[in-house]
Image (cartoon, rainbow, N blue to C red):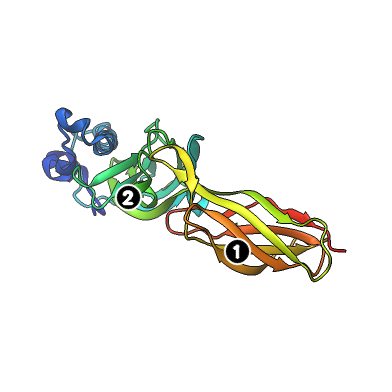
């Protein structure tokens, strides 16, 4: 992980700073995510280099070894999980707050997936279409910059194995050309969308104290095939809200079949709405079925 890099290091010693991302053109097709990261990071550093060069009396690639720009905070998607289905694109905003005594010129951010920050171990990348951020310079020294990403399941999430923990790359450039980057500033979770369909509670109506049977199906998005498939062997809660109330209580927890099917029974003691609820896990979003009202006589 690189915490702070001066332009002298990032350019004059560029072979060290960028060596992990010297992706040959012939290999770009074999490692498209790494190639995207390489292009993005090199562009960010070129932007910082150009800013330093614009200072009077300063040559490109020359600045103090210890720059004083800092990244103070990074917020991704409002600190919520990013949930992707099979087709709809998801817009994600990243806010980078940074400080430099000379003020903030620009910031950058992207998401990457892999075991380490090099071309051999990055297998997923989501970068902004526009490299320049929208910065709000709310003081002479600090700014919060907005970077917008579009998550496309058809292109960015090419395999279901990408579900789970991703890394956030963040960088900031001061008005004096000072540059800071952190390839793993924080983590964010991108999860496969889950859904519970075909909810039914029967019979309707039912006599008080009698048994109702609740059925439904739990499935989740496959990014590999861009379809929803049954999610088997998962714990799902059967919940109930009395008529006139919006508060649900968990009646019991049941497991889905190998194909994601749900079927269980419960005693009907009052009129109200029944539903199934699946809590999120490390790779899959939470899901709530539609409610089914059952009148009790």
Measuring from the top left, give residue 36's x and y in whole percent: 28, 35
Q: Is residue 49 above or below residue 204?
A: above
Choose mark 1 or mark 2, whichever is in front.
1
The quadrant where residue 279 appears: bottom right
Identity of the residue furthest to the top in this view: 25
The residue closer to the viewer here, 267 or 44, is 267
Give the side of residue 22 with respect to residue 251, left or right: left
Assign the C terminus to one quadrant of the image: bottom right
Q: Is residue 293 left or right of residue 106?
A: right
Residue 157 % position (x, y): 38, 40
x and y, in percent, of residue 126 in the image: 37, 39
Judged from the image, the secondary structure of the residue bearing numbered disc 2 is loop
Residue 69 disc label: 2
Q: Taking 205 as reference, is 239 left or right?
A: left
Give residue 254's position: percent from left, percent from top.
Answer: 57, 65
Residue at screen point 67% across, 65% down: 265
């Amino acid at each position: 992980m690189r915490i702070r890099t001066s332009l002298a290091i990032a350019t004059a010693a560029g072979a060290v700073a960028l060596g992990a991302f010297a992706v040959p053109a012939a290999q770009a097709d074999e490692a498209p995510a790494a190639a995207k990261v390489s292009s993005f990071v090199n562009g960010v550093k070129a932007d910082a280099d150009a800013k330093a060069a614009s200072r009077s009396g300063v040559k490109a690639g020359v600045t103090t070894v210890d720059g004083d720009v800092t990244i103070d905070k990074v917020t991704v998607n409002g600190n919520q999980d990013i949930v992707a289905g099979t087709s709809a694109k998801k817009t994600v905003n990243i806010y980078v707050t940074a400080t430099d005594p000379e003020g903030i010129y620009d910031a950058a951010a992207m998401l990457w997936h892999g075991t380490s920050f090099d071309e051999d171990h990055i297998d997923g990348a989501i970068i902004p279409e526009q490299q320049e951020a929208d910065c709000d310079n709310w003081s002479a020294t600090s700014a919060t910059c907005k970077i917008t990403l579009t998550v496309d399941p058809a292109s960015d999430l090419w395999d279901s194995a990408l579900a789970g923990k991703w890394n956030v790359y963040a960088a900031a450039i001061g008005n004096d050309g000072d540059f800071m980057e952190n390839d793993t500033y924080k983590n964010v979770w991108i999860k496969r969308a889950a859904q519970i369909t075909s909810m039914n509670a029967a019979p309707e109506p039912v006599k008080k104290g009698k048994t109702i049977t609740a059925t439904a199906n739990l499935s989740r998005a496959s990014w590999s095939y861009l379809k929803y498939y049954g999610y088997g062997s998962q714990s799902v809660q059967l919940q109930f809200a009395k008529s006139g109330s919006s508060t649900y209580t968990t009646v019991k927890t049941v497991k889905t079949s190998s194909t994601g099917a749900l079927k269980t029974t419960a005693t009907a003691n009052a009129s109200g709405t029944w539903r199934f609820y699946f809590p999120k896990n490390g790779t899959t979003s939470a899901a709530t079925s539609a409610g089914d009202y059952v009148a009790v006589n």
